Image: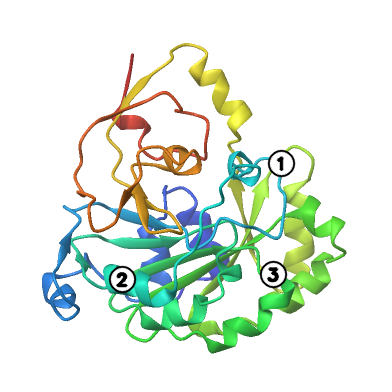
Amino acid sequence: MSISKKARFFISKRISPYPKIKWELNAEIKGSRKLRHALKYGKPINLWGKSHLHIYPVLECNLQCYFCQNRFYVDKEPKIKFKPAKQWLKYLNRMYNVHHLDINGGEPMLYPEIVELLNGLRNWNIVIFTNMPRNRIHTFQEIYPNNNNIMFCVSYHVLEEEKRGRDIAEFVKDFKTIPKRLNPTAHIIDIPEISYKNIRTAFAKRGIFIQASDAITPTEHNKITDNFRVVKCKSDMDTIAPDLKVYPCLAFMLRQINGKYISDYKFTNEHIFCGFYGLCGPCSTQKDIIRL
């Protein structure tokens, strides 16, 4: 039975985070990376059944969205230096026992070797979050899934796009140039300043279904932390910074606290004490939070 793209995401947006139904409807879903995949590339790295691994090839971005947690990084010195794709692949392809690889930023398409990185990965479920920078549109044509499942989640940031003079018609035109092999999906951050209904209608007229995603800003999160200072968190989403240092979560990475180089890091599901809960992006581990 066939199902429309609109119906797919009507269903999938009710499953969070990173719904498996997206994979089932857009590509053949792969299970956790197997040990035999990792053995081909050197000494295997066991991620102990973590559901997601988040990597940040770069933290720089071409936009300046007010709700983005990366504003904690923008004025920070020294900046985190990025590593070449060859070094990323040296470790990523040796990992096993993990389900998804999420590639974030900043803006990941600004990473100079993004093509080499994506084309060099093997046997992953990959989600790339991008705002589709205009000066990097040509790059999409050079990327191939190989034996990965790959999906590009392309976000339309209304306020920032208006500043830069790219209206909906031009955005859709650029979006349609992304090859279908990359499973591009359109998303909009649902913020009070815009009407999602109007944006959705404008995209629909051009043949694109756009899905709304909630914006949970650091300011809104602070309302949670008013009630307690520290949480005990059991996160299953380790975060790898551009310099290949690993952190238990995004808040620690942006503040460059207790990062360990990837070869020295132990991927386990231990509780950590965090005084920054709510001061970064949406956290999918709220059910594992112990409030102190």
Residue highlighted by disc 3: 133
Give the camera-side residue of 140 and 43. Answer: 43
Amino acid type indicated by mark 2: Ile
Q: What is the C-alpha distance between the residues marked 2 and 3?
A: 28 Å
Q: Which mark is residue 29?
A: 2
Q: Residue 66 carries which label?
A: 1
Q: Which residue is drawn at 43% across and 77% down?
A: 118
Amino acid type indicated by mark 3: Pro
Residue 59 point in image, percent of width and height: 56, 55
Badge 1: residue crowd in 10 Å (few <14, some 14–19, many ≥20): few
Q: Is mark 2 on a helix, strand or loop?
A: loop
Badge 2: residue crowd in 10 Å (few <14, some 14–19, many ≥20): some
Q: What element carries label 3?
A: loop
Residue 273 point in image, percent of width and height: 31, 25
Res 38 quadrant in image:
bottom left
Q: Which residue is drawn at 43% across and 15% down?
A: 229
Q: What is the C-alpha distance between the residues marked 1 and 3?
A: 18 Å
Left or right: where 12 falls relative to 163: left
Q: What colouring does the structure picture have?
A: rainbow
Give the camera-side residue of 142 and 3. Answer: 142
Badges 2 and 3: C-beta atoms under 8 Å apart? no
Left or right: where 132 falls relative to 112: right
**Res 15 visible:** yes
